[in-house]
Image: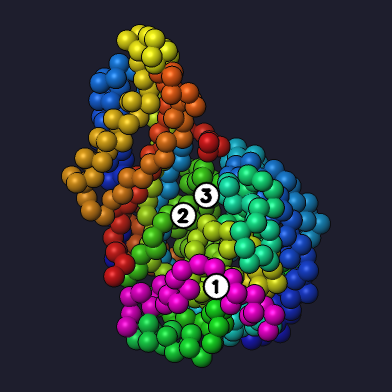
Amino acid sequence: MVRSNHVAEAVALQARVDDIARGAALMTETTYKKQFIDALADTVPNHALETVLYRNFEALGVPAHTADEHAYANALAATYPGSDALPGIGAGYDAAIAETVRSLRAAAGGAMNDFLVPLYQGEAFQPGSTDVGDVSWQCPTGQIHVASWPNGCPGHSWQNVSCDRTEIGHKAAVHAGKVLAGAVIDLLEDPALLAAARAEFEKQTAAGYTCPIPPDAVPVVPD
Amino acid sequence: MNQNKQAALAAVEKKAPLVADVADSVWEYAELSLQEERSCAKYCAVLAQEGFTVEKGICGIPTAFSAAYGSGRPVIGLLAEYDALSGLSQKAESLTREERIPGGCGHGCGHNLLGAGAFAAALGVKAYLEKSGVSGTVVLYGCPGEEGGAAKAFMARENLWRALDAALTWHPDDVNEVVTGSSNSCIQTQYHFTGVAAHAAGDPDRGRSALDAVELMNLGVQFLREHMSDKARVHYAITDAGGRSPNVVQPRSSVLCIWCGPTMWRRR
Ligand SMILES: [Zn+2]
């Protein structure tokens, strides 16, 4: 599949909002200045790298938690709504994976999802945006998630902050390090893996990358 | 799993206390996007100690860095982030909302862990390269300003990532999985309006309200939403509403707009 260049479309939408700003200034007899803050591209997935990551994740398993850690995670999960949501990207798109995740969650029995979601490589979309997207337009890029919070823990929440300095968090970081290191080692040992990742990347990004950052822009500290 | 790989993963486990220390330090620093001086300095110091060749301030971004080990191809990148979020100061291991520092920042997206995990991976790959003598270079990239600033996109403008054979990273989440699929493309722009201040009761005819302009702009964008691709989004925040005094015609006001999408896939 060749991905279309979405950055160009976002630029066109921005031009329409510029007109609205001009109109608002005209109506109020004020002036305005436009200041570019930042911009980022959508993410290009790479199934070849995903497979390498999954093989390592499977071999290494998932972080194990103590009774105390489980007790904390369960209690933290009681402080927000949605702690019974079905986790994982694949579960949102694939009925069989959703079923598997449901039973894995039931077996786990607590708020920590101490299991690995089966590999899913269908179409998927992650709400939100990340500048990892721009990396993924310039070289084959792969990513994993490691359970660092209890199930359904809302993003950008105090619960995240609280949990990010616990043994649960430390274990997640170390485990992520192992899975990523394992995958890098496989890539170093088997040139065919990198060749496959590269071939897939070239095909996916044939539309070309438009860097959404204007040539004269400098990084801006957000207000 | 071969011996060299096994030894490399054991090396990561051995470094667990150092990884936790880095994660906790960055958690405490809790620095906002592109202001991550202490977090960046911590990484640069620890990586130099661990035998990496460290370069601070790459691509003209003061709190970005690269830390390389090994030689020749392939070159594999690992991506670290370490910025925090405003208004999220919070005590650790707590079960209630309690600020650690009143009005302070906090790691509400787990980037203290994200960076530490990527760092751990770099240590593992270094251990492998040392032991195996295999050709290859691992580079840990310190990528500031993920929450705001889009440093990796600025780095992409310099074509930094084109030199890599592959890049890997992770993000803390509530689940263990390999990530697939796409995300939004986004552009963030701030509109600063300037009017004329005047006493709102005494001289309103002499004032021109920048706050009115921002309100009208938001209203205009609201009407635009019906007439754009339903895969696109425009979000906004009024970052400056003028002042706190209703008896002043607000001479300045700003609105921050974010355009997102359109995207290929929609979640069912
Ligand atoms: Zn994040």
In primary-sequence order, the first of circles 2 and 1 is 1
Classify mark 2 as within 8 Å of ligand 1 or not, answering yes or no.
yes
Determine the CA span between mark 2 and mark 3.
8 Å
| Residue for point 29% across, 19% down | A28
Marks 2 and 3 on same chain: no
| Residue for point 48% across, 71% down | A152
Across and down, in percent, residue A121 comes to 38, 75
Does dot 1 land on a helix, a strand or a loop?
helix
Check if mark 3's residue and mark 1's residue have beta carbons within 8 Å.
no
Marks 3 and 1 on same chain: no
Mark 2 crowd level (few <14, some 14–19, many ≥20, 10 Å Cα) = many
The outermost residue toward the left is: B227
| Residue for point 54% across, 68% down | A79
Q: Which one is nearer the viewer's eye here, A169 or A163?
A: A163
* Picture quadrant where residue A127 is located: bottom left
Mark 3 crowd level (few <14, some 14–19, many ≥20, 10 Å Cα) = many
The image's mark for residue A130 is: 2
- Judging by the rendered image, the residue that carries numbered circle 3 is B147
- Judging by the rendered image, the residue that carries numbered circle 1 is A77
Check if mark 2's residue and mark 1's residue have beta carbons within 8 Å.
no
Q: Amino acid at mark 3?
A: Glu
Image position of B151 (left or right of A71) = left
Check if mark 2's residue and mark 3's residue have beta carbons within 8 Å.
no
Determine the CA span between mark 3 and mark 1.
25 Å
Locate the N terminus of chain A by quadrant: bottom left
The outermost residue toward the right is: B49
Stretch in magenta: A67-95
Image position of B89 (left or right of A100) = right
